[in-house]
Image (spheres, coloured by chain):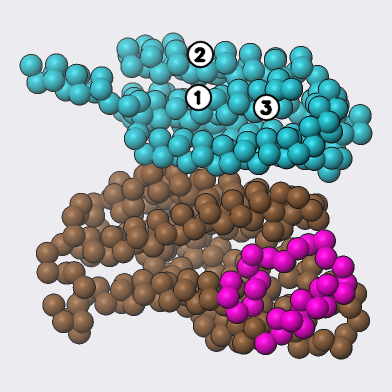
Amino acid sequence: MSWRNNSKRELWLAWYSMIAFYNIFVIVFFVLTHAQPPPYPYWSDAQVVFWFSHNRGGLLTGFAIMFALAGLTLPANALIAYSIRRMSVSRAFAYSYLVIYSLAALPGMLLLCVVLSVGAMRPDRDPVLIHWLYDFAFLSYVGTMGIFLIGSLVWMLAILLDKNRVLPKWFGYLNLCNALTEVVVSPAWIFHRGVLDWNGLISWWLNMVVFGIYTSAFIMLLRNMIQREDFGDGPLPTHQLAGTAR
Amino acid sequence: MTDNAGEGKRDRAIPGQPDMWVLVLFEALVFTAYFAVYLYHRSADSELFLRSQAQLRPLFGTLDTLLLLTSSLFMLRCAQTARAGAHRTAMTSAYITAFLGVAFLISKITEWIMLVRGGHGFSSNDFFMYYFFLTGIHLLHLLIGFIAIGVIVYQLRGPARRSQELVETCAVYWHTVDLLWVLIFSLLYVVR
């Protein structure tokens, strides 16, 4: 079936946008800006200033890309909201998820991008202020996961109540595991060192493993959902529909 | 013949939704990682950990363990009696399970308050950081367990919606909370 006649092309567009976003996210945060894994929270003013000056090019290039392409999160969130709308549950779940995750982009990503960009663009400022920006950026980024927690729980509840078998129940429970790891990052506000600080073994590294598994799972499950989508309102077919593959 | 075959198939099946076992295994892996990190740091500074461990009251840990083990027993009874069709008895067992869970909650919060008043808070030292973190994250699992008990009671109250599978699914979750506590108790209170 040609792309022009493929009734699922909008869904595939959203899915590929999601893939593109996560790839860009990894390149920007892990490779260009070195904002992930986060640098140490206990650094002195001088070390923080050095970090900004050392990474200046990467920070400005990476976050310029992010500001331009952050909108790619929207089709990704919309596709997840679509999965909830396809379920047999109230539309309120999809609307709640969409609103929560649209707002989550601010503390969960954009605030860090803005604040670190400010630090990189004003190297002549007082090191104390630069250090304040550094703390603000990483605490807002790592420590404000409550909004993601609620979003995961909304999706979990929708999956567990759904009778249309849009997504498997095990993924509903995996949402709970992901939500619980969002709680584990909150001690980052208290600790400057150790396993619970903002780049700690438990609060960041272990959580990143869980988040990676969770994200990989939902990317594959949403792909599977699109393949099975029949545009009806009853249970989703178990297997991929003939003639509707990409 | 068909019924027997069906029953035989059911007997071989794992209790509850197989999906719940994904959560059980996943949480077991996550907690194993927590425990591994704890033991690694404990071995690096065993003197501090032993000294701090001595500040805990073993009575609380033992009481908490007994409360949760007994609650698991009643949860098991709840699932068994529900399967046998004795739904009122099952509901009573679910209520007792919840009561024991509340008793655990009160005991744990009391212990926390006593420790904090004694100058041993979350950020006092590495041992108490792990202590409050592990007991805190476990308590969060327990609170979710109350929702699971609520689901059981909701299922058992309505004859039209009774689902043995859901009752067993929630029971599996409760037993997981119990199992995690036994491991936390061993690591924080017992291991020297």
Instruction: Find disc 1 in the rendering and name its residue.
Output: B175
Residue A161, image x, y percentages:
38, 44
What stretch of residues is rendered in magenta?
A: A30-57
Q: Are marks 1 and 2 on the same chain?
A: yes
What chain is tagged by disc 3? Answer: B
What chain is tagged by disc 2? Answer: B
Q: In whole angstroms, how far apart are the C-alphas of marks 1 and 3?
A: 19 Å
Instruction: Find disc 2 in the rendering and name its residue.
Output: B73
Residue A111, image x, y percentages:
68, 74
Q: Are marks 2 and 3 on the same chain?
A: yes
**Nearer to me, A174 or A77:** A174
| Residue sitting at x 51%, y 39% | B29
| Marks 1 and 3 in Cβ contact (< 8 Å) | no
Chain with cyan colouring = B
Residue A99, image x, y percentages:
53, 66
Q: Amino acid at mark 1?
A: His
**Nearer to me, B172 or A119:** A119
Chain with brown colouring = A
Q: In whole angstroms, how far apart are the C-alphas of marks 1 and 2?
A: 9 Å
Disc 3 packing (10 Å; few <14; some 14–19; many ≥20): some
Of badges 1 and 3, the one in the foreground is 3
**Marking on residue B187:** 3
Residue B104 in view, yes or no: no
| Residue sitting at x 35%, y 34% | B17
**Upstream in sequence: badge 2 or badge 3:** 2
Of badges 2 and 3, the one in the foreground is 3
A50 magenta-colored:
yes
Q: In whole angstroms, how far apart are the C-alphas of marks 2 and 3?
A: 23 Å
